[in-house]
Amino acid sequence: MHATLKGIDYQKCFLFFLFFFPSLAYAQYANTFEEGLALEKAFKTEQAFEKFEAVIKQNPKHPKAYTHASRMLSNMGGRLPMSKLEEKRKLLEKARKYAEKSIELSPDDPDARLAHIISLGLLSEISRNPREKVLDAKLIHGEAKKIIELDSLYGEAYFVLGKWQLELSRLNWFELLACKLLFGGLPEEISKQAALEYFNKALSINPNSILYLFGQASAYADLGEKEKAVKVLQRALKLPLSEPDDEQRKERCRNLLNTLQK
């Protein structure tokens, strides 16, 4: 009888370890992830990244941890000056890899694809290879369109397409011709008006985004509609900060406003 009871005790112990400890581990990295989100919301980028990185080590198949870690790496890399180019590139490459891993784990998550777009855009800005820039531009366009297929009210995707249009519309005719002839062309016609329409769509989804307002003002400025651009920038500067990069975005708004008012 005693041996049987002892056997039952061992069995209970085994079941306890089998079911309790995985649950405990899950709760631990779930809490760590939530801590990371809170730090991200408080604009504490480096500390948030450390939390997301810890979650990835605990659970290498946590797609949201990769997504948010990628965004934090892009923020960190994007803020570094060009005098720290190699460090900047290293952070952005890691951001790209993490975003790609998140897409691999969760291909229908638009947030993962946006993280990928952001890393690609920042890498393209520091690339000196014209072919690489064009290929990145085509990939960014494809990712933005995919996001809209997944979620037609995902404002960031429309902003990306607006920025994509605006930047390419600033190329001269020779550069655009080179894109078409040497790099297989571009996926849609380029114009400043198309850029404005994309920015307007993003703002119809979130009218108080400093990022979207800066895009709209930039398009107005490029189209020669100075008064409209000034009004948009003045409105953007009155808005409260709501995202980690909003202070930098306001600085861009101030710089563009100063340029237009000279």
Image (cartoon, rainbow, N blue to C red):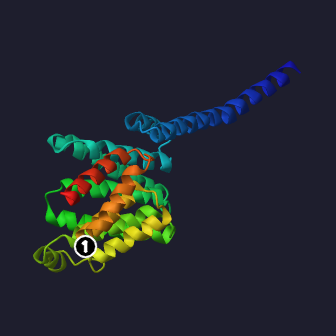
Q: Residues within 10 Å of mark 1 (few under 14, many from 20)?
A: some
| Residue that appears at 10% across and 76% down | 174
Which of the pair 109/154 is nearer the observer?
154
Q: Is residue 170 left or right of residue 105?
A: left
Q: Secondary structure at mark 1?
A: loop
- The C terminus is located in which quarter? bottom left
Extreme residue in the left direction: 174
What percent of the width, then of the height, locates residue 136?
26, 64
Residue 9 is left or right of residue 128, and the answer is: right
Please indicate, yes or no, whether residue 30 appears anywhere in the rendered image: yes
Q: Residue 47, image x and y in percent? A: 41, 33
- What residue is shown at x 14% (from left), y 41% (from top)? 83
* Farthest right residue in view: 1
| Mark 1, residue position | 223
- Residue 27, percent from left and from top: 61, 36
Which quarter of the rendering shows the N terminus? top right
Left or right of 144? Residue 35 is: right
